[in-house]
Structure formats: C-alpha cells, structure tokens
Amino acid sequence: MSDMSQEGSAQNPTPRINQRVLVATLFGLLCGGYAQGAADRTIPAIMSMVQRIELETAYADYQDSSLYRTSVLLIATF
C-alpha cells in the first residue's frame, strides 16, 4: 500500500515545478522592468556628476547609447 502512495506523489511534482518556474520567470521580468526603470532615472544623473555635464545632455547621451542600455539590461537579468 505504501508503494501506491509513493507512485502518486512521484507523478504530482511536474505540474507544481512548472508553476514555480512560471512564477519565477514572471517575478524576474517584474524585477528586470523595475531595474530598467530605476536605471533610466539614475544613470544619467550619475553620468552628469562624473562627467560634469548638464543633466539633459547626460540623459540624451544615455538614450542614444546602446552600450549603456544593454549593460543595464544584462545586469538586471542577473
């Protein structure tokens, strides 16, 4: 009888694992989106302080640079 209960429990983890992976993926996307939004606001301010340029110029440089945006995306992914 204990063999039957073990068989039933062995078949159930797969749907539960799929749900956990889906929830983890959605949470990761939410965190990544938040990090991207936060970076869009803070990185130009940091750039303007470090490079001693105006905030508007730093914001334009950040928006035009694919390197900065890709770096933020990669960091947010991890």
Image: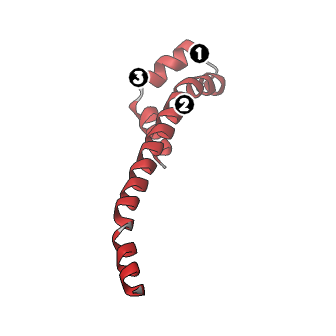
Mark 2 → mark 3, Cα distance in angstroms: 15 Å
Amino acid type, residue under disc 3 in the picture: Asp
Q: Work out whether 55 lies above or below 65.
A: above
SS at circle 1 = helix
Estimate how packed mark 1 is, as few (under 14), some (14 to 19) or many (20 or more) residues with alpha carbons within 10 Å: some
Residue 15: x and y in percent read 35, 60
Of the numbered discs 1 and 3, the one sitting upstream in the chain is 1
Q: Which mark is residue 78?
A: none
Residue 75: x and y in percent read 50, 44
The reply to whether callout 2 and callout 1 are in contact (CB within 8 Å) is no
Q: Which mark is residue 64?
A: 3
Front residue of this view, candidates 3 and 42: 3
Q: To which residue does mark 1 refer? A: 55
Front residue of this view, candidates 42 and 68: 42
Total of numbered circles in the picture?
3
Q: Which residue is rendered at x = 52% and y = 33% of the image?
A: 34
Which tag is nearer the camera, tag 2 or tag 1? 2
Q: To which residue does mark 2 refer? A: 39
SS at circle 3 = helix
Q: Work out whether 65 lies above or below 78.
A: above
Estimate how packed mark 2 is, as few (under 14), some (14 to 19) or many (20 or more) residues with alpha carbons within 10 Å: some
